């Protein structure tokens, strides 16, 4: 009885530690799902905010630094990725834009893509996109900064 | 055991009966039920209604933020603003000139009598409601429609501080319910 209780407590402790250890590394999420989410977000962002392109190095980083990242993104979103050479990413020479893809994380049965962007007054805020496959189901914009 | 403890034990033993729970147990069961009922009903009754000025300030904030950061392509439906500001004839004056310029040119006489009667007949941004959700919180719900692209529902969550100028400020925007034609 005491042995079973000890095992139960140990398992519960381990599970709690795993649950509270923070977001899992992005490469735990399959590459195809990440590419789908980025396609959805790039297209949705263009619809909501205009044609400003995604930072090519963000896409490169979130798709495991593969050389063919543009081909992993669906054709309708490929045009939404900014110019630049992926080979220079991480060397300080990559192009920059006003919006950056910060992270991709699991959120229940969907993926959450966090974008950091800058408003017209220069203050930064966050956009969180909930993506399921190639569709965005919700966009949350928050952390507005008031002068 | 102390004297109080002995008395408590005696009371416990004396009141334990298989046919009826002790009075203390009944009170303990009913108290959370009563408190929950009060929280559900009393809280709603306790919130003061939003004044026209408060709703106008919220719309001022939302329309400005939306056009600065989200989209400047679609006009704001004037009739929806007129309706949510209690059909005030001077509803345009409640908004800042920056926001006023973004309203469609609808005259109040041509606006429907109620929000329920209003139909979205053209591309635009329609205010649906301004609701207080807490003493210092409110939500503006709006619908954006585009004939070619369907539409989306937008909710703007505003908050005001409990000190200082107490101006309503935007905390979060949630855009969802996307529909595509």
Image (cartoon, grey):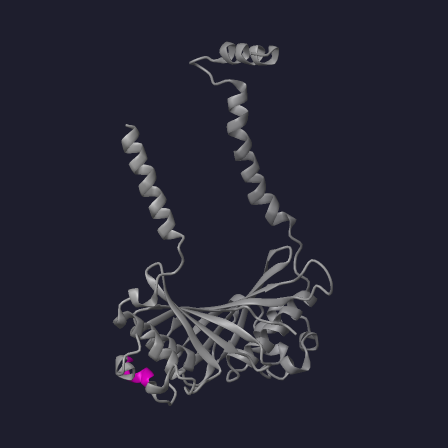
Q: Give left or right: position of B138 versus A86.
A: right
Residue A54 drawn at (x, y percent): 40, 82
- Residue at screen point 73% across, 63% down: B164
- Residue at screen point 39% across, 55% down: A21
Residue A63 drawn at (x, y percent): 31, 75
Q: Magenta residues, as a range?
A: A73-79
Please state, as top left, top right, bottom left or bottom right, where the N terminus of chain B lies in the image. Answer: top right
Q: Which residue is situated farthest in the right direction here?
A: B164
Q: Nearer the viewer, residue B143 or A4?
A: A4
- Residue at screen point 61% across, 13% down: B4
Q: Nearer the viewer, residue A146 or B76?
A: A146
Q: Nearer the viewer, residue B118 or A79?
A: A79
Question: Is the residue B32 above or below the residue B78 in the image?
Answer: above
Q: Give left or right: position of B34 versus A92.
A: right
**Any part of residue B174 in sight:** yes
Residue B151 drawn at (x, y percent): 42, 75
Residue A111 drawn at (x, y percent): 35, 66
């Amino acid at each position: 009885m005491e042995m079973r209780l000890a095992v139960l407590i140990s398992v519960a402790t381990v599970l709690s530690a795993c649950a509270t250890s923070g977001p899992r590394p992005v490469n735990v999420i399959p590459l195809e799902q990440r590419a789908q989410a980025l396609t959805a977000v790039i297209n949705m962002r263009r619809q909501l905010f205009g044609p400003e392109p995604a930072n090519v190095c963000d896409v490169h980083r979130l798709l495991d630094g593969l050389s063919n990242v543009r081909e992993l993104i669906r054709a309708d979103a490929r045009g939404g990725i900014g110019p630049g050479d992926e080979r220079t990413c991480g060397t300080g020479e990559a192009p920059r834009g006003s919006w950056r893809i910060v992270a991709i994380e699991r959120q229940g049965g969907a993926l959450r893509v966090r974008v950091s962007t800058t408003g017209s007054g220069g203050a930064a805020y966050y956009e969180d996109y909930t993506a399921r496959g190639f569709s965005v189901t919700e966009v949350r914009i928050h952390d507005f900064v008031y002068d | 055991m102390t004297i109080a403890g002995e008395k408590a034990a005696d009371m416990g033993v004396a009141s334990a009966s298989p046919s009826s729970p002790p009075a203390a147990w009944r009170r303990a069961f009913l108290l959370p039920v009563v408190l929950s009922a009060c929280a559900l009903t009393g809280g709603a009754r306790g919130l003061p209604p939003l004044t026209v000025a408060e709703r106008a300030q919220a719309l001022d904030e939302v329309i400005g933020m939306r056009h600065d950061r989200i989209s400047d392509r679609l006009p704001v439906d004037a009739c929806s603003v007129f309706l949510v500001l209690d059909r005030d004839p001077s509803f345009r004056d409640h908004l800042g000139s920056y926001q006023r310029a973004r309203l469609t040119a609808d005259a109040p006489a041509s606006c429907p009598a109620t929000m329920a009667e209003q139909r979205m007949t053209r591309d635009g941004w329609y205010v649906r409601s301004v609701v207080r959700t807490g003493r210092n919180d409110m939500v503006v719900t709006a619908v954006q429609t585009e004939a070619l692209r369907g539409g989306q529902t937008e909710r703007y969550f505003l908050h005001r501080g409990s000190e200082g100028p107490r101006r309503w400020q935007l905390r979060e925007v949630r855009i969802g319910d996307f529909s595509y034609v």
